[in-house]
């Protein structure tokens, strides 16, 4: 019996985690080709994953509607506690809610490289190529098959039984008009500075620093990148903004708030107590109306291949990567048994 072959499109956090999950699934042995135009180490506005913070941070607000979500959060990380702000010296003026917990921070470039190494070690066929999106989803399926077959004699057309689409915002070019209209960027901008901050901190929904500036889409976070000797400062969540250029004025406001709230005093090792800036960058979180799409495409195969989507993970692609890859594996395993 020929091995079932799967093509996975995309080598961001979603594609790499999915490749590892499908490859390690003991219930089914797949042969996998991973195809992407960008890989760890590349820099492009079309490649979001290297631009992330990235940490796990609670998404629940003080709203009663989020009470259930706050309960879930308690089970995800250690020592999760809603703070009594009256007793917190460090709480900024006007704060309405705060939580403290042990969390996870990643050195994103290193983590992506690590996942890619694991994918290669696992025997996944890793190909750098742009998949032609000009003929819609069917064209994408055909082109991915062609790329897989040209890269290895082990794959015949009929062996390819599934394609997993992990192309982030790139999906908008081939998923059809109605679906593409649901996809939008949530622009983020960060500064990398020297040194590792002692704590990961996020402040959101604060009052404007000046009445002349609309900074409603801005938040402030400090995320150390363990082992890298650097820390990420952020940021913003600008819905619908595709601008790839760094906004220097926004950087100024980010640094001003971090200094004002004393969020990373230990990193002020530069001239006159400034931070030592290494770089600044823009990334586009893959937003989707209705949340991430992790599901099978329709009820029929496309050009003889089942298509399973996993895109639109917005600002939580790292947080949700393991859970989403498990869901994809479950769908693919069910399809393999048909
Ligand atoms: C500033 C910022 C901070 C963030 N912080 C966090 C955080 O703290 N925690 C968290 O969980 N998330 C965070 N995120 C969100 C997270 O980065 C994204 O959700 C995640 O990176 C999306 O990954 P992805 O693999 O789906 O897409 P991408 O990383 O964009 O990967 C898409 C892949 O598809 C490939 N591709 C697309 N089209 C084609 C084609 N036609 N042919 C071949 N290949 C193609 C690309 O080359 C690429 O390899 C942050 C994002 C930003 C911008």
Image (spheres, grey):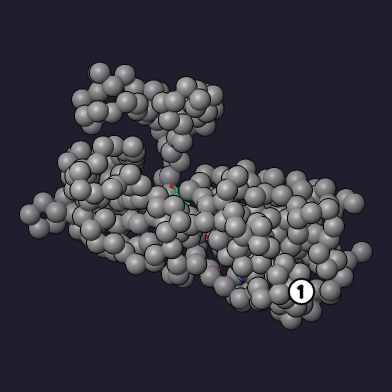
In the displayed structure, does residue 2 sit left or right of residue 239? right
Residue at which label 1 appears = 142
- Residue at x-position 25% and y-position 23%: 88
- Label 1, residues with CA under 10 Å away: few <14, some 14-19, many ≥20: some
Residue 285's place in the image compared with 100, above or below, is below
- Residue at x-position 43% and y-position 30%: 61
Quarter of the image where one finds residue 12? bottom right
Give the camera-side residue of 328 and 135.
135
- Residue at x-position 7% and y-position 54%: 272
- Residue at x-position 46% and y-position 36%: 59
Give the camera-side residue of 53 and 205.
205
Quarter of the image where one finds residue 167? bottom right
**Disc 1, SS:** helix
**Relative image position of residue 152 (x, y in whole percent):** 75, 77
Quarter of the image where one finds residue 263? top left
Give the camera-side residue of 152 and 45.
45
**Relative image position of residue 232 (x, y in whole percent):** 32, 52
- Residue 64 visible in this rendered orientation of the protein: yes
Residue 181's place in the image compared with 152, above or below, is above
In the displayed structure, does residue 50 sit left or right of residue 326? left
Q: How many marks?
A: 1
Residue 280's place in the image compared with 25, above or below, is below
Give the camera-side residue of 164 and 226.
164
């Amino acid at each position: 019996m020929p091995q079932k072959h799967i093509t996975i499109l995309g080598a961001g956090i979603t594609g790499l985690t999915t490749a590892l999950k499908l490859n390690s699934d003991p219930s089914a042995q797949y042969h996998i080709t991973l195809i992407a135009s960008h890989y760890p180490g590349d820099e492009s506005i079309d490649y979001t994953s290297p631009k992330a913070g990235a940490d796990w941070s609670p998404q629940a607000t003080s709203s009663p509607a989020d009470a259930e979500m706050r309960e879930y959060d308690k089970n995800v990380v250690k020592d999760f506690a809603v703070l009594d702000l009256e007793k917190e010296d460090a709480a900024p003026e006007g704060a309405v809610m705060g939580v403290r917990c042990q969390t996870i921070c990643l050195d994103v470039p290193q983590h992506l490289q690590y996942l890619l190494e694991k994918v290669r070690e696992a025997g996944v066929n890793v190909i750098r190529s742009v998949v032609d999106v000009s003929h819609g989803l069917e064209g994408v399926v055909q082109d991915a098959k062609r790329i897989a077959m040209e890269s290895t004699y082990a794959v015949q057309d009929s062996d390819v039984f599934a394609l997993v689409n992990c192309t982030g915002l790139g999906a908008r070019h081939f998923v059809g008009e109605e679906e593409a209209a649901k996809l939008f960027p949530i622009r983020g901008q960060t500064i990398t500075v020297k040194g590792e901050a002692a704590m990961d901190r996020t402040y959101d929904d604060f009052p404007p620093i000046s009445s002349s500036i609309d900074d409603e889409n801005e938040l402030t976070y400090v995320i150390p990148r363990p082992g890298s000797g650097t820390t990420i400062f952020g940021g913003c969540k600008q819905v619908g903004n595709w601008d790839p250029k760094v906004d220097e004025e926004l950087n100024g406001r980010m640094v001003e708030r971090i200094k004002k709230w004393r969020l990373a005093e230990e990193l002020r090792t530069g001239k006159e107590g400034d931070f030592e800036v290494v770089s600044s960058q823009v990334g586009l979180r893959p937003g989707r109306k209705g949340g991430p799409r992790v599901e099978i495409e329709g009820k029929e195969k496309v050009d003889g291949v089942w298509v399973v989507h996993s895109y639109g993970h917005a600002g939580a692609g790292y947080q949700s990567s393991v859970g989403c890859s498990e869901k994809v594996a479950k769908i693919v395993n069910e399809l393999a048994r048909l």
